Image: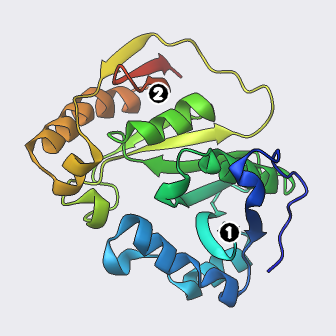
Amino acid sequence: MSGDTSDAAAPSDPLARLEFVDLTTAQQLAHLPPFEARIWGGGGDCVSVNMLVATVGEGGVAIGAFDDGEIVGAVYGFPTREPHVLHSHYMAVDPRWRRNRLGVALKQRQRQWCLERDITHMRWTYDPLQLGNAHLNLHVLGCRGVAYHVDYYGHLGGINGSLPSDRVMVSWDLRDGAATPDAELAVDVPPATPDDIAESNDAALHARLTVRAELDERMRSGWQLVDVDRDGRRYLLARD
């Protein structure tokens, strides 16, 4: 297995031992469905190998991170109706690697892949109750939350339980120097742990409906998410 490791991490960095590989063939892409199922559950909703082959062949991208031949992280995205935008359908990271900035490394490699092909923006969705993901998207990468979608994917199962699959769509300007407006409004997020979400208990449903009530109409009228206070459990918004 070969991959581009020219921008290797520092020797003390655990990422230095990983191999990052552009996945293009059916044999390479076959790593992804079982990895996706292991990370999120959900049974048959994984992206199939034949769909991965077709979308990557038509201009999509799949990048895997391997530790001694074992896949521990991946990103996958495909072209959109706008030639300058890639939709990043998912990023999956093995729980053992979630404190080592592997997610950031994968997104930066995906960003570089895009810029080399004159793609200047990426879009993807995330669950607004998952504030760890919000922190990566809004605070670390500098994305903006540009739309709120109610029950976007329908029933998902797995780590999503039976909650409505509300999602925030984020947009990432990949060019250097992209500006972020100053926040004008804060919206609190009620407590809901990943276990609450998976169990779809009363706390998770209350949090889902509260956040929906706070964000859906505002974002349809031009407000955007520009940052998140993960510890304080609040989103910061600005007008577009």
Which kind of residue does numbered mark 1 sit on?
A: Phe
**Relative horizontal placement of residue 106, taking residue 209 as reference (left or right):** right
Q: Which residue is mark 2?
A: 225
Q: Residue at x 44, y 20 (%)?
A: 237
Residue 66 badge:
1
Q: Residue at x 73, y 56 (%)?
A: 83
Residue 17, placed above or below residue 119: below
Residue 225, placed above or below residue 29: above
**Relative horizontal placement of residue 138, taking residue 209 as reference (left or right):** right
- Real-space Cα separation, disc 2 to disc 1, in angstroms: 33 Å
Which kind of residue does numbered mark 2 sit on?
A: Leu
Please say if the residues under marks 2 and 1 sit with CB atoms less than 8 Å apart: no
Instruction: Return the disc, 2 or 1, that comes first in the chain's sequence.
Output: 1
Residue 65 percent location from the top left of the image: 68, 65
Residue 91 percent location from the top left of the image: 55, 58
Q: Residue at x 68, y 69 (%)?
A: 66
**Relative horizontal placement of residue 147, taking residue 204 as reference (left or right):** right
| Circle 1 residues within 10 Å: few <14, some 14–19, many ≥20 | some
Q: Quadrant of residue 236?
A: top left
Residue 60 percent location from the top left of the image: 69, 68
Residue 72 percent location from the top left of the image: 58, 65
Residue 215, placed above or below residue 113: above
Q: Is residue 147 visible?
A: yes
